[in-house]
Image: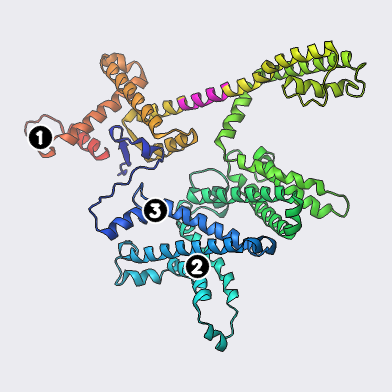
């Protein structure tokens, strides 16, 4: 028999849960102190507590530690600020020690350890606890090993500072659950399909896909920041080698990502052919941006002895465009431009026409007075653009009365002409958001037709609400309006004769679903034993009618 689907009733629908917003944790203040602390800080099964925040800030602190350890190896940066580096190291140790002791104290409340004989010893022997201990141990060994021990065992304790790199292992506390979820989602799938789940949006990516995108995004920002700082002579002089190493690592990461995307592209719909599918993916704008992000490095490395290609380094800034792949705002903007292109092209044509006419008039009236500035019409186009744009740098300006009069008129016209594309984009962007929200409302209305939302429908609505940046209040308002519309439509439908309803298949389906829902609600409130006894003793219902009753209740 088919298992009944897990669903949520309309009356129980919570917009905060629907759009994935944080809700206030339901934790009783009457719990014992240790249970209360565990519920608030470390229990991953209570929505709205501080567990996710604790993991997030610990992860941020770990990454910050990694960066400081790298910067410590650069004397020009470390020496002037070594006290600040030491203070940050002490702060990190304090936080990590507090975390370790808190988890040690609350181990008896953890499901993983509470059933064991000694929960705290079991926690200390667990892999995560050992990693947490190794992350803080080098600091205390360096600070508190007695000096007389050095006389018998001559060890340079400064070497222990390198063991602080073990702190990066603490990030696995967040990554391992995501990896476990990823394995569950991709069980019995091929290696290429798993790579595809990491590279492309699908139902199989889970949290690990989000972490991978975050990892790539962080490296994009780091590499672009390095490109910017390379242009500062004083900084580049001090850490030029580090910039080269950093760029090499970044290119290696982006190259692996690019190859993974091309390799798994055949799992995308419309890319099934191994050759043409990958070519089609290569020509995709976002994938071509990935190619441009790594191209300057390889061209310079392979052809530097033939051509001076150092100018290509500036094109590494194209890596910033990689961040547009996961941007909903960018996707919406492209839709707007595509939809409004005829109007925008007309506005652009008017601007170009006005610029050429203005430049021609400027050349005509100013060439005699200023032959060195209004040398020709192409030069005058520069003056026309900055005049119509109301910028007016002042490096080229008319001196004749007619030229100045033309400048005044063109400046006033430019305010309106240049505002047209901006106004079109703003209006079309807002209109596109309204259309997408209306589409979301239509989807919700269609899904609420049976009075319930199953897990797949909830996941779809959650992703759409997140994409459209809907708040809890906005989602609640949409749900209330749609539920009222649905109830009103059903009431008006019930007032029609059955033969009229039957003439429209869609109405007939909705009416049938409504009646099934009414029977299910009746089954919830009625005394089942009394109902069946009455139905069978007085032959009120036939055997087939009773069987239908039982089946409806089983599936609801």
If you read the primary sequence from the N terminus, does the residue marked by circle 3 or circle 2 appear first? 3
- What coloring was used for the rendering? rainbow
Residue 407 picture quarter: top right
Q: Is there any visible trace of residue 278 in the rendered image? A: no
- Around disc 2, counting alpha carbons within 10 Å, would you say few (fewer than 14), some (14 to 19), or many (20 or more)? many
> In this rendering, is residue 167 above or below 22?
below
Which mark is nearer the camera, 1 or 2?
A: 2
Residue 428 falls inside the magenta stretch = yes
By secondary structure, the bulk of the magenta-drawn segment is best described as helix
396 lies left or right of 368: left
Which residues are drawn in magenta?
427-437
Query: In the image, residue 285 lies at what x, y percent?
Result: 67, 38
Disc 2 marks which residue? 135
Residue 537 picture quarter: top left
Q: Secondary structure at mark 3?
A: helix
Which quadrant of the figure contains the C terminus?
top left
> In this rendering, is residue 14 above or below 384?
below
Q: Secondary structure at mark 2?
A: helix
Q: Residue at x 58, y 70 (%)?
A: 161
Residue 51 is tagged as 3
């Amino acid at each position: 028999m088919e298992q009944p689907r897990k669903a949520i009733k309309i009356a129980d629908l919570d917009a905060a849960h629907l759009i994935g917003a944080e809700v206030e944790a339901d934790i009783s203040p009457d719990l014992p102190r240790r249970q209360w602390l565990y519920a608030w800080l470390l229990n991953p099964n209570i929505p709205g507590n501080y567990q996710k925040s604790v993991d997030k800030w610990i992860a941020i602190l770990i990454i910050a530690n990694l960066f400081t350890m790298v910067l410590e190896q650069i004397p020009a940066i470390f020496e002037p600020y070594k006290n600040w580096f030491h203070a940050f190291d002490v702060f990190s140790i304090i936080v990590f020690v507090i975390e370790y002791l808190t988890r040690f104290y609350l181990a008896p409340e953890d499901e993983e350890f509470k059933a064991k004989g000694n929960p705290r010893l079991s926690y200390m022997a667990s892999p995560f606890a050992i990693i947490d201990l190794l992350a803080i141990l080098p600091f205390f060994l360096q600070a508190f090993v007695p000096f007389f021990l050095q006389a018998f065992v001559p060890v340079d304790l400064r070497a222990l500072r390198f063991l602080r790199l073990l702190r990066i292992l603490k990030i696995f506390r967040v990554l391992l659950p995501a990896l476990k979820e990823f394995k569950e989602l991709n069980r019995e799938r091929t290696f290429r399909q798993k790579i595809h789940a990491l590279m492309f949006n699908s139902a199989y990516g889970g949290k690990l896909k989000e972490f991978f995108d975050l990892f790539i995004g962080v490296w994009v920002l780091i590499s672009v920041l390095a490109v910017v700082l390379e242009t500062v002579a004083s900084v580049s002089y001090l850490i030029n080698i580090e910039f080269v190493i950093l760029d090499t690592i970044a290119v290696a990461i982006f190259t692996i990502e690019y190859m993974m995307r091309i390799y798994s592209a055949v799992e995308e719909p419309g890319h099934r052919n191994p050759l043409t599918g990958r070519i089609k993916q290569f020509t995709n704008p976002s994938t071509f941006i990935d190619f441009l992000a790594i191209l300057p490095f390889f061209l310079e490395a392979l052809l530097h002895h033939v051509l001076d290609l150092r100018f290509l380094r500036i094109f590494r800034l194209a890596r910033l465009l990689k961040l547009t792949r996961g941007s909903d705002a960018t996707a919406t903007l492209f839709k707007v431009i595509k939809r409004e292109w005829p109007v925008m092209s007309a506005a652009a044509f008017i601007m170009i026409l006005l610029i050429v006419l203005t430049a021609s008039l400027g050349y005509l009236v100013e060439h005699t007075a200023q032959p060195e500035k209004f040398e020709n019409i192409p030069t005058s186009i520069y003056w026309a653009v900055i005049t119509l744009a109301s910028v007016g740098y002042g490096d080229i300006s008319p001196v004749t009365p007619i030229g100045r009069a033309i400048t005044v008129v063109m400046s006033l016209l430019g305010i309106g002409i240049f505002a047209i594309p901006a106004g079109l984009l703003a209006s079309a962007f807002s209109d596109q958001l309204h259309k997408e929200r209306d589409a979301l409302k239509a989807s919700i209305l269609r899904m609420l037709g049976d009075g319930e939302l199953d897990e797949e429908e909830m996941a779809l609505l959650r992703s759409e609400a997140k994409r459209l940046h809907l708040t809890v209040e906005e989602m609640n308002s949409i749900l209330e309006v749609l539920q009222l519309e649905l109830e009103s439509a059903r009431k008006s439908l019930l007032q029609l004769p059955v033969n009229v309803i039957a003439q429209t298949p869609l109405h007939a389906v909705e009416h049938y679903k409504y009646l099934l829902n009414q029977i299910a609600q009746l089954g919830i409130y009625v005394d089942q034993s009394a109902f069946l006894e009455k139905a069978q003793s007085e032959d009120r219902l036939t055997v087939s009618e009773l069987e239908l009753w039982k089946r409806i209740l089983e599936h609801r």
